[in-house]
Image: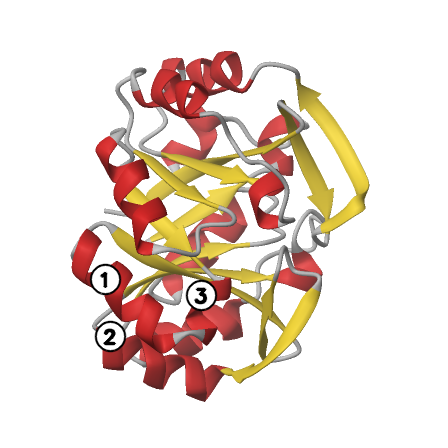
Amino acid sequence: MFTVRPAIDVMAGQVVRLYQGSPDAVTVYHRDPVAQSACFVKAKAQALHLVDLDGAFGRPGLPAGLVRDIVSLGCPVELGGGIRTEEAVARWLELGVDRVLVGSVLQDRRELAAMARVAGPDHLAAALDIRADRLAVEGWRVTSGLYMDQLTEILRDVGLTELVVTAVERDGTGLGPDLDLVRSFVAAGFRVTGSGGIRDCGDLSALRGVGADGAVVGRALYEGRLTMKEALSC
């Protein structure tokens, strides 16, 4: 099943969207992440894509109570942003998060393998934020030395099969997803959720056409260019 995941990016306690991941280009869409999550659940969202931007930028992250309140809405929640230890993975899973997303820790194969053992293959996914064919880390502020073929090797080595792939240059721009980027990871045998720049049903259909298993949609939903009903009908 192709799963549409509305993005709930939280910074300073508010639901925001960034432009190309920049903390200096912030648009606030809602002041209550739980209320916004409830709106998406009421609109029949299949899953929620929750991102702790403060954690990603190395600041104190999401309160456990807030995450627990969102989980209690009864919709599967995947959570990413600043998760760099196996203890953090275990803590979020114990709170009821369905899937934990990790990105920067892909640079540390030993820690990544420990996380995979704690979570199991169904509850840990790699958040591949790609800029110029390399992994962007530390809240996208740093472009690592890891290229896509190296990432593929690391993921296979630790047994991760599920990815959320974001084209950083397209995130928040409404320019459409990077279909070639998604297609490359699908061809390598991974289950891929595409993210970055999604505008409308046409983009969702195009992602499905290249083999993606789902999509993360943000600004298009918040600005009314796409509704959850339309997204699900695609």
Q: Earlier in the sequence, mark 2 or mark 3?
A: 3
Query: What secondary structure is marked by label 3?
Result: helix
Residue 143's quadrant in the figure? bottom right
- The residue beneath circle 3 is 105
Q: In the drawing, does residue 183 fall left or right of residue 99?
A: right
Give the residue drawn at x 67%, y 31%.
Answer: 16
* Front residue of this view, candidates 227 and 24: 24
Q: Quadrant of the C terminus?
A: top left
Contact check, label 1 and label 2, Cβ < 8 Å: yes
Q: Which mark is residue 116?
A: 1
Query: What secondary structure is marked by label 1?
Result: helix
Q: In the drawing, does residue 104 fall left or right of residue 136?
A: left
Instruction: Provide residue 30's location: percent of width, then percent of height.
Output: 65, 18
Name the residue type under label 1: Ala
Q: CA distance from mark 1 to mark 3?
A: 12 Å
Name the residue type under label 3: Val
Q: CA distance from mark 2 to mark 3?
A: 12 Å
Name the residue type under label 2: Val
Instruction: Provide residue 222's location: percent of width, then percent of height.
Output: 63, 27
Crowdedness near tag 1: few (<14), some (14–19) or many (≥20) residues, C-alpha within 10 Å: many
Give the residue drawn at x 47%, y 61%.
Answer: 103
Q: Which mark is residue 7?
A: none
Instruction: Provide residue 157's location: percent of width, then percent of height.
Output: 25, 81
